[in-house]
Image (cartoon, grey):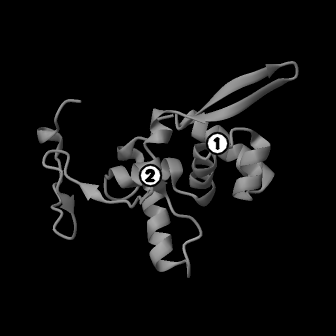
């Protein structure tokens, strides 16, 4: 399933397209759980706290959107588990940024911290070319159809 930006209401924007795919609580919590190693339905259910039928629908939608893939681990009875695709892995910085925002503005004490070799990891915007961290001085460039670069 591909979200078509021109079919969404309002301003044409990749944020709107992304939210059309993962813009509800359960979708992002599923991605969180799978990224933490919960691959089976029962483990994802326990970790998210989602209603069973809602989780089933969300898993199907995330597979259809290419965020998750199903992998069969048992033929008899047929059983599959869920794994992140490249698109799913690309959501991990989004989860990290949401966690950091929640730590600052929602939680009294952050319940979890991410570390790499003993260093705390934080979400930040970094220029791909020069490596400079970006802050409030980020420029917005609206790309028009006539100046879109080929991918």
Can residue 8 be seen by looking at this rendering? no
Give me the C-alpha separation between circle 2 and circle 1.
17 Å
**Residue 88 image position (x, y, % from top left):** 50, 40
Rendered view: 89 above or below 141: above
- Taking depth in this image into account, of 100 and 26 the one nearest to the observer is 100
Q: Count up the numbered dots.
A: 2
Residue furthest top in the image: 75
Locate residue 47: give its quadrant. bottom right
- Taking depth in this image into account, of 123 and 3 the one nearest to the observer is 123
**Residue 72 image position (x, y, % from top left):** 72, 23
Can residue 53 be seen by looking at this rendering? yes
Q: Residue at x 75, y 46 (%)?
A: 43
Helix, strand or loop status at disc 1: loop
Q: Tag 2: Cα neighbours inside 10 Å, few (<14), some, or many (≥20)?
A: few
Determine contact: label 2, label 1, CB under 8 Å. no
Give whichever of discs 2 and 1 has the lower sequence position. Answer: 1
Would you name the residue on which mark 2 appears?
A: 116
Q: Residue at x 61, y 55 (%)?
A: 29
Horizontal relation, residue 12 to residue 2: left or right? left
**Residue 51 image position (x, y, % from top left):** 77, 56
Would you name the residue on which mark 1 appears?
A: 37
- Taking depth in this image into account, of 93 and 55 the one nearest to the observer is 93
Q: Residue at x 59, y 69 (%)?
A: 111
Residue furthest right in the image: 77
């Amino acid at each position: 399933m591909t979200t078509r930006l021109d079919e969404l209401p309002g301003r044409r924007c990749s944020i709107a397209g992304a939210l059309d795919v993962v813009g509800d609580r359960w979708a992002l919590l599923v991605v969180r759980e799978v990224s933490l190693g919960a691959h089976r339905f029962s483990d994802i259910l326990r970790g998210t706290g989602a209603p069973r039928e809602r989780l089933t629908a969300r898993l199907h939608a995330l597979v259809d959107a290419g965020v998750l893939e199903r992998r069969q681990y048992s033929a008899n009875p047929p059983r599959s588990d869920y794994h992140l695709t490249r698109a799913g892995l690309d959501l991990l910085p989004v989860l990290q940024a949401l966690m950091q925002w929640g730590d600052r503005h929602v939680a009294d004490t952050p319940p979890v911290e991410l570390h790499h070799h003993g260093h705390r990891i934080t979400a930040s915007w970094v220029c791909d070319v020069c490596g400079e961290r970006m802050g409030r001085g980020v420029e917005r460039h609206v790309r028009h159809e006539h100046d879109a670069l080929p991918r």
